[in-house]
Structure formats: structure tokens, C-alpha cells
Amino acid sequence: MSNNEHPNASYLSCRPPYKGQCLCGAVQYSVDALEAKMGHCHCSMCRKFHGAAFATYGEAKTENFHWLSGESLLKSYHAANGTQRKFCGVCGSSLIFEEANASGAIVEFALGTLDSDISVKPDVHIFVGNKASWYSVEDDLPCFHEGRDSSREVL
Ligand SMILES: [Zn+2]
Ligand SMILES: [Zn+2]
């Protein structure tokens, strides 16, 4: 019986540690605590990496993110701009994004791979300047032309 069939599943599964895994299940991780930042990224690289309209990343302090299995199966794609994306070498699931000059203090992970329910919600759309023409943002979250720290909020 999976947690989802438990009558109190949503209550129980909203409590950490949160667990996630890739499509094939070889790579598994847990998260002790989520940070408040949770962005939908519309940049063309995230769109391609996910094969989707946008990517949504959760953030956790490095000490709160744990690989449970399959870390050795991870493959990395290093892009020309210095960013790094990690994915399952077996099934190809997108798992990790790292900025070019990442301090290593924060892990950004592909939220779609999470199996647990969480109470934190996405707070922003970023890189909407690269948004797919066929997707329209239809919520009230702030939209930034580039990163969330840029002053170029799109109204
Ligand atoms: Zn996999
Ligand atoms: Zn992106």
C-alpha cells in the first residue's frame, strides 16, 4: 500500500522528510526542510532539459538534502554558460540544477520528481523573456524577465 492510499496521507506526507525519485526509481533523495524560494523557470535551457513549458525547482540547504540511492548513476550536462544540470543516467529524469558560481550552500532540485505532498508553493516565474510562445502564465505570481533578483519585473 502506498502512502497515497492512507486515509491521512496528505497530513502525513506534508511532514518532512520529503522524498523524491526519478522515473525509474534508481535515484532517490530526501529533503529535511524546504526553503521558501520555489520558482518556475521559463528559460530555454530549462524547457529543453525538462521537455516542458517550464521547470519548477525546489530549494533546500545542502545539509538538508540527502541522496538515498543512485547518486553514482547521476550524469551531468555542463552548459556553455557554466550552469550544470544533473539527470538520472538510466531514465533521463531531470533532477538537479546548479548555477555557474554556485556556493554549494543550496541544492536546487526538480520539484516534479518529488513524491511527497508539500505545503510550500511556487512564488515566482523567472526568465519569462524566454517563455514558450504556446504557454501563457495564468496565475498572479510575480514574473521576471530574467532572474528573480533582476529589477525587470514584467507586469
Ligand atoms: Zn532513473
Ligand atoms: Zn531555467
Image (cartoon, rainbow, N blue to C red):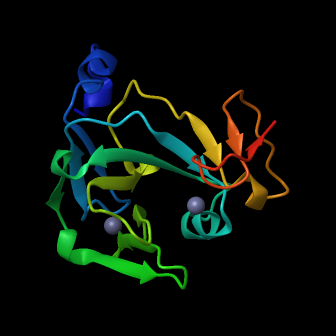
Q: Residue at x 55, y 33 (%)?
A: 123
Q: Is residue 64 toward the left or the right of residue 126 in the image? A: left
Quadrant hosting ligand 1: bottom left
Q: Please identify the residue farthest to the front as the structure is shown.
A: 151
Q: Quadrant of the C terminus?
A: top right
Q: Is residue 38 toward the left or the right of residue 48 in the image? A: left
Please provide percent x and percent y for residue 61: 25, 47
Please provide percent x and percent y for residue 39: 54, 44
Q: Quadrant of the N terminus?
A: top left
Give whichever of 9, 107 is nearer the camera.
107
Q: Residue at x 57, y 47 (%)?
A: 149
Q: Residue at x 42, y 28 (%)?
A: 120
Please provide percent x and percent y for residue 128: 73, 52
Instruction: Say if 42 sits above or below 26 in the image.
Output: above
Please provide percent x and percent y for residue 117: 36, 30
Residue 88 in which image quadrant: bottom left
